[in-house]
Amino acid sequence: MNRAPVTLLSLAQRKQAGEPIVMVTAYDHPSAVIADEVGVDVVLVGDSAANVVLGYGSTVPVSVAEMLMLVGAVRRGLTSALLVADLPFGSYEVSDSQAVRTAQLLVKKGGADAVKIERGGTSVDRAAAIVAAGIPVMGHVGLTPQTAASLGGYRAQGRTADQAAALLRDALALQDAGCFAIVLEAVPAAVTELVVPLLDCVTIGIGAGPTTDGQVLVWHDLLGLSGPQLPRFVRAFADLRERTVAGLSAYADAVRSKEFPQAEHTYLIPDAELDALRQRLTPPPHHEGEDPSTSSGN
Ligand code: KIV
């Protein structure tokens, strides 16, 4: 089915109409094709790629070059979903011009429609600069994994009145900076319920309860491809890990028992060609007194 491209305007309209927005992360081309086919509204190439697909221990080490490769692969798989790319840690904090340059790379080389930036504080100015350069920006408050160490680890945020008020201040500042949407991560549902009505921009939740305008989950988490230790806010909607292990084990067994491949998995050659090949490969008869190493075979 050909869907109209998702735009900032159509997302705002969805918010107004109270129609939940579906957002998911993706890191490769086949996943992007499936997300688009299913009608997902927003696909995020999150810097969660660092731990989810690149094997790093946190989101911090992933580079712009690594993100660019993943964003490009996802871009080539999407026709209608809005593509958002994370600004990786260390690629935007130093100055507005650093932030704009990185955002431009993700849009120009990667094909992203928008970028996502973590935190309030200095990120508010960076977001404003990127928006001023013509690139849509999604904010991200609450648990911001790039700076998890300074938040006391991977834990829910906004659990005191002071913290929750600070979270709202950050969200409002990001909105004023021009962000079209804001992700709220790991925030008590009751706090989200108070904060969301105070924001005009689109809100997307992950572990923030049901009252945001949309939800986002990490691809591997929601499909049951991650390990058994999942954050509280994840529901696995499928068990692809179990099915992948079963499929891979069946393949290994079939190779080891020589049950695979069968005739239907191989290519044919015409009989005449095969005969000709056999003749060519048949060693010429060896004559008495002839040195086989110097024989031309003709
Ligand atoms: O990097 C990521 O996947 C994210 C989402 C969890 C919002 O930032």
Image: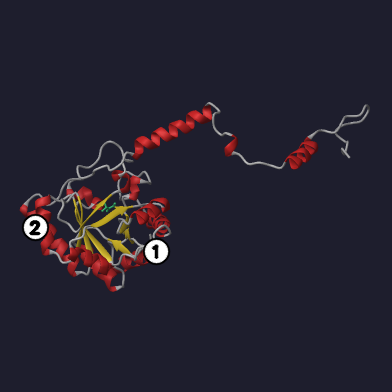
User: Where the C terminus falls, by quadrant?
Assistant: top right
Query: Of the residues shown, which amino acid type is indicated by label 1?
Result: Gly
Q: CA distance from mark 1 to mark 2?
A: 35 Å
* Label 1 sits on residue: 111
Q: Mark 2 or mark 1, which is nearer the start of the sequence?
A: 1
Location of residue 296 in the rendering, given as x and y in whole percent from the top left corner:
87, 39
Q: Please state, as top left, top right, bottom left or bottom right, where the N terminus lies in the image.
A: bottom left
Q: Can you name the residue that lies furthest to the right here?
A: 289
Q: Residue visible at 54% across and 32% down?
A: 260
Up/down of 56 relative to 263, above or below: below
Instruction: Please tell me whether residue 84 is drawn above or below residue 57 in the rendered image.
Output: below
Is residue 126 visible in this depiction of the protein?
A: no
**Mark 2 lies on residue:** 194
Residue 247 x %, y %: 43, 35
Q: Nearer the viewer, residue 150 or 18?
A: 18
Residue 102 image offset from top left, x and y in percent? 35, 64
> 122 and 224: which one is in front?
224
Q: Residue at (42%, 64%) from the top-left corner?
A: 109
